[in-house]
Image (cartoon, helix red, strand yellow):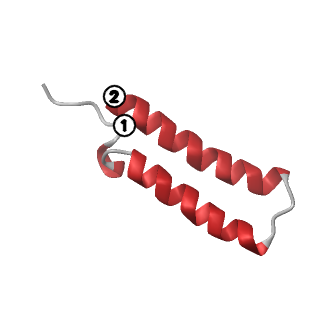
Amino acid sequence: MNKDLRVVLALVIISLVILRGYLFDTSPIDTYLDYGAVLLALVVMPRPKFALWPRRS
């Protein structure tokens, strides 16, 4: 998978988790789903610290 695509996918996952908390009533079990979604996003993202920085050629 392309690195830029993985970064965008990870940011979309995190933003949907945050947005869901504002749109729907959350229950305590949703906290575990939030942690799982953020962990999934971190697995998908290649290197979070340098993900959106330009590459050296």
x%, y% of residue 6? 41, 36
Distance from disc 1 to disc 2, alpha carbons, whole Å, reads: 13 Å
Q: Residue at x 42, y 54 (%)?
A: 42
Q: Residue at x 68, y 53 (%)?
A: 18
Numbered tag placed on residue 39 in the rendering? none
Answer above or below: position of 42 versus 27.
above
Identify the residue at the far bottom of this view. Answer: 28
Left or right: where 8 falls relative to 21: left
The kind of residue on which mark 2 rests is Asn
Residue pointed to by mark 1: 52
Q: Quadrant of the C terminus?
A: top left
Identify the residue at the far left of this view. Answer: 57
Residue pointed to by mark 2: 2
The mark nearer the N terminus, 1 or 2, is 2
Left or right: where 38 falls relative to 30: left
Disc 1 is placed on an element classified as loop
x%, y% of residue 37? 57, 56
Left or right: where 51 falls relative to 13: left
The kind of residue on which mark 1 rests is Leu
For mark 2, does the 10 Å Cα neighbourhood hold few (<14), some (14 to 19), or many (20 or more) residues?
few
For this rendering, which residue is in front, 2 or 23? 2
For this rendering, which residue is in front, 23 or 40? 40
Whether pointer 1 and pointer 2 mark residues with C-beta atoms closer than 8 Å, the reply is no
For mark 1, does the 10 Å Cα neighbourhood hold few (<14), some (14 to 19), or many (20 or more) residues?
few
The image shows a total of numbered marks equal to: 2
Disc 2 is placed on an element classified as loop
x%, y% of residue 14? 58, 49
Q: Residue at x 57, y 45 (%)?
A: 13
Q: Quadrant of the N terminus?
A: top left
For this rendering, which residue is in front, 24 or 55? 24
